[in-house]
Image: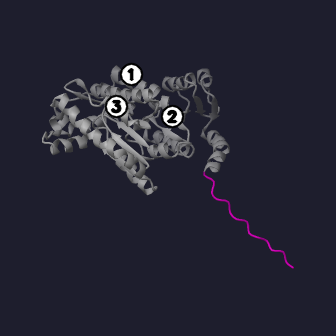
Amino acid sequence: MLIITTAISGSRRKEYLRRFEERAKKEGKKIKIYHVGEMMLEHSRAIGINFKLENILNSPPSVINAVRSAVFEKITAELPLELKRNHVVFINIHTMFFWKKVFLRAWDNYYVGQLNPDMFLAFVDDVLDIAKNLKDRAQWKKEKLTTNDLLMWRNVDVEMAASWAEMKKKQFYIIPAPSNEKLLFRLLFEPHREKIYAAMPITHFTSPKDQRTVDQFIKKLEKYFIIFDPREIEMIEQWKSSIKTDAVLHQIVNRDLYWLIRQVDRVIAYFPKAVSSPGVMNELREAHETNKEAWLVYPKEAHMSPFLSYYSNMIFRGPESLFKFLNAEKGVKNNRATSPKKKRRKKITKKK
């Protein structure tokens, strides 16, 4: 399987894939990762151009493009053999750089088309963590990127990768960089599992105790599904009010409704307590109107808005009700899919 991944600088994509590779090896899977940026720096030194990491984006576009093309020629020459040797080959690229307040194109249309990957992935990270990471890098210190700059850069990166996947009619997923590498492993090697967006009224449940309750619920869900949890990207409810601008909030709504929900089979909304949540209401509506299953898990005997029930395909009064259903329905299917070998019956010899 060949996968092209994108991410903006500082998104911890490399760290995630390193953890993924370690997990894959333990499971007997072979992985090959091409870091195009690092290969460009190595090639520039080999041919005497000698790019400097902190100033590479000041180089003439024609020079950058020529070095990138040489790197892609090397990759395309190696790919047939590497695809035979490995279960998955990743090619890590950038779609855009945000440099001197201008978007600079960082891909080559020709090679994206020639590679013809099986899947595109966009790695996204909490923009506050990205900001911290970039402030420690000589290349990005002087850029002084704001939260809004990073959100816009991330938005462009995701939309570019999504458009490539759409044009090539390939699968596309957004992977939260802070998530467990198990998410990507199951996505690639357990394709039979349904993908779920876990909706919840986060604004009302920000305390550590409430978060643990949600964590326990999601951990149980993972027995049956691949889970996309919006908390693994940003928890803006815990941000300072001064940085929660309209631009930031609009990005978060777009992220949940049009990125994460788009890539799943079903939305499961969990209310630990009965509260009003316009966010969850809209997530259920989005699932409903895009022909996805929408399930609601709501407290027993608590009053429920008719709008919640209207947009829900199934309603479970409490987690116990949901897991009882899943044990009966999904448990049987999972057992069939991974059923152990039948034990041989012992031969019974009749006494003479």
* Residue at the image position 13 percent from the left and 41 percent from the top: 50
Q: Between 326 and 140, which is closer to the camera in this rendering?
A: 140
Please identify the quadrant where the C terminus is shown.
Answer: bottom right
Q: Residues within 10 Å of mark 1 (few under 14, many from 20)?
A: few
Q: Secondary structure of the magenta portion, mostly?
A: loop
Q: Of marks 2 and 3, which one's residue comes earlier in the chain? A: 2
Residue that extends furthest to the bottom in the rendered view of this protein: 352
Query: Per the image, is 349 magenta?
Result: yes
Displayed quadrant of residue 333: top right
Amino acid of disc 2 = Tyr
What is the x, y in percent for residue 243? 30, 26
Q: CA distance from mark 1 to mark 3?
A: 15 Å
Amino acid of disc 3 = Trp
What is the x, y in percent for residue 287? 54, 26
Q: Is residue 124 in view?
A: no
Q: Is residue 214 in view?
A: yes
Say which element carries label 1.
Answer: helix
Tell me the residue that label 1 is attached to. 250
What is the x, y in percent for residue 237? 39, 31
* Residue at the image position 29 percent from the left and 36 percent from the top: 130
Query: Per the image, is 229 magenta?
Result: no
Q: Residues within 10 Å of mark 2 (few under 14, many from 20)?
A: many
Tell me the residue that label 2 is attached to. 197
Q: Of marks 2 and 1, which one's residue comes earlier in the chain? A: 2
Say which element carries label 2.
Answer: strand
Tell us which disc is closer to us: 1 or 3.
Answer: 1
Q: Which residues are magenta?
A: 338-352
Tell me the residue that label 3 is attached to. 239
